Image (cartoon, rainbow, N blue to C red):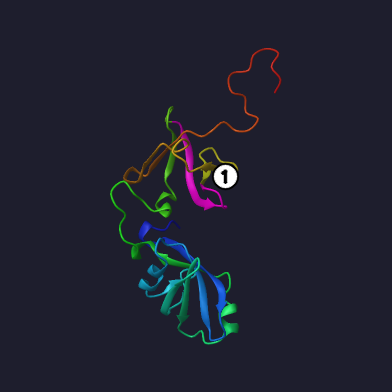
């Protein structure tokens, strides 16, 4: 079952553990302003179930330190370490013109920017520490692969049309042109 964009959950933070001994929780915030987390009524788990309700928060290194309903001890706060916190896409403000959320890319069709050949669909957006990568499910089936989300590799994003135009870099070991007699593969 495909979720509509308004039902999509957006990752906004991760519990880093306890802060002190009175049950405060350290949260690594993935929002531009870490205190934005306090504007959401309930932070959810990836499955959509309630995870945390913040009653107060203050900015700290790499995020916030928060008091959460029902979390009163260091042990309870530490037990949440690693919990990923999400909000519904519909809870976020609409992006400005010519802007979008990375989650809005999921499910879009990917076509080659030059040939218009169908490449596949975006399965997910990942970031393993360097830059964002689009995980592509190939149109002809097979294993997913990653496309760097750079201006060179993805020159155009057309959210309203459900389309991403891509110019994938040559694969490692892929010949750069047609093979000639005598070329080794």
Magenta segment, which residues?
Answer: 117-132
Vertical position of residue 105 compared to residue 14: above or below: above
Foreground: 122 or 29?
A: 29
* Residue at the image point whose x is 51% and y is 42% from the top: 148
* Residue at the image point whose x is 43% and y is 75% from the top: 58
Looking at the image, residue 102 sits to the left or right of residue 98; the answer is right
Vertical position of residue 71 compared to residue 36: above or below: below
Foreground: 4 or 145?
A: 145
- Please give the residue where the numbered disc 1 appears in the rendered image: 144
* Residue 135 picture location, percent across and down: 53, 47
* Residue at the image point whose x is 51% and y is 84% from the top: 71
* Residue 112 picture location, percent across and down: 45, 33
Image quadrant occupied by the N terminus: bottom left
Q: Is residue 180 magenta?
A: no
Instruction: Specify few, some or many for label 1: CA neighbours under 10 Å numbering under 14, 14-19, or 20 or more.
Output: some
Q: Quadrant of residue 78?
A: bottom right
* Residue 31 picture location, percent across and down: 42, 62
């Amino acid at each position: 079952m495909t979720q509509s964009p308004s039902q999509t959950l957006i990752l906004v933070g991760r519990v880093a553990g306890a802060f002190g001994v009175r049950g405060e929780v350290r949260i690594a915030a993935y929002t531009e302003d870490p205190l934005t987390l306090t504007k959401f009524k309930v932070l959810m788990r990836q499955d959509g179930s309630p995870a945390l309700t913040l009653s107060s928060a203050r900015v700290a290194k790499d995020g916030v330190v928060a008091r959460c309903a029902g979390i009163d001890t260091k042990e309870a706060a530490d037990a949440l370490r690693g919990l990923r916190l999400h909000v519904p896409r519909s809870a976020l403000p609409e992006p400005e013109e010519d802007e979008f959320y990375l989650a809005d890319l999921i499910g879009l069709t990917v076509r080659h920017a030059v040939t218009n050949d169908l490449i596949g669909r975006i399965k997910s957006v990942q970031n393993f520490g360097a830059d964002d990568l689009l995980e592509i499910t190939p149109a002809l089936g097979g294993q997913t692969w990653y496309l760097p989300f750079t201006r060179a590799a993805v020159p155009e994003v057309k959210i309203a049309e459900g389309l991403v135009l891509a110019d994938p870099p040559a694969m490692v070991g892929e010949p750069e042109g047609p093979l000639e007699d005598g070329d080794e593969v």
